[in-house]
Each structure stands twice: as C-alpha cells, then as structure tokens.
Image (tube, rainbow, N blue to C red):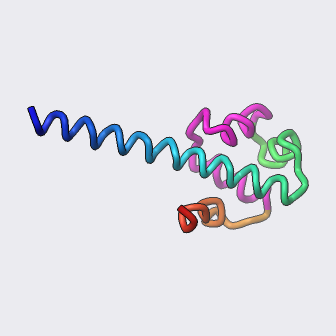
Amino acid sequence: MFIKVFANRQFHIMKIDEEKFAENFGKKIREVRIKAKLSQEMLANDANIPINQVGRIERAEINTSINTIYKLAKALGIDVKDLFDFEKKD
C-alpha cells in the first residue's frame, strides 16, 4: 500500500514538473518572438507551421515535436538550445 501511494505521489510530482516545463518552454518562445518583433502569425509563416500552433505552444496547450522546435528556432534566428535556456533560471 505504501509503495502504491508513494508511486502515485511520484507520478503527481513528475506530472507537475512536465507541466511546468511546457509552461516555461512556451514562455521562452513568446519572449524570444516578442524580442524579435514577430507576431504569432509571422513566426508561424516563417517556421512553416499552422498559425494557431504558435499560440498553443506558448500557452502550453500542446507538446510539440522536435521538428517544430527546430523550425521555430530557425525562424527566430537562434540555436535550438537557446529555447531551453529557462531551465537555468528555475
């Protein structure tokens, strides 16, 4: 019984961490996009992804693919690793 409760608690903590990661990633995309003076539509067009996808990523409504992350970084003119720079702050 204790192990099951502990396992459930670990899952809950891990889920919160995953949600926070997605939120931080979305905030980073938004921060870099605004700094580059790009609208969501402009970024989507430059990255060749659906327009609504940028907003959904920024709001942490979806997890995105590696390919999309690469396209976003390229469209923003930064290295992919820079999109994950938020981890150093948390």
Q: Is-magenta flag for residue 51? A: yes
Name the one closer to the observer, 6 or 66.
6
Q: Quadrant of residue 62?
A: top right
Classified by dominant secondary structure, the portion drawn in magenta counts as helix
Assign the N terminus to one quadrant of the image: top left
- Which residue is depicted at the point 80% across and 34% down? 51
Q: Quadrant of residue 53?
A: top right
Whether residue 67 is situated above or below residue 86 in the rendered picture = above
- The picture places residue 58, in percent across and down from the top left corner, at 69, 42
Q: Position of residue 38 (x, y in %)?
A: 88, 50
Tag count: 0
Measured as percent of width and height from the top left, residue 61 is found at 61, 33
Judged left or right of residue 40, residue 57 is left
Instruction: Indicate yes or no whether the magenta region holds residue 59.
Output: yes
Q: Seen from this angle, which residue lies furthest left?
A: 1
Residue at 36% x, 44% y is 13
Q: Which residues are magenta?
A: 50-76
Residue drawn where x is 19% and y is 40% of the image: 6
Relative to 89, residue 1 above or below: above
Q: Is residue 20 above or below residue 87?
A: above
- Across and down, in percent, residue 3 comes to 12, 39
Residue in front for this viewpoint, 61 or 50? 61
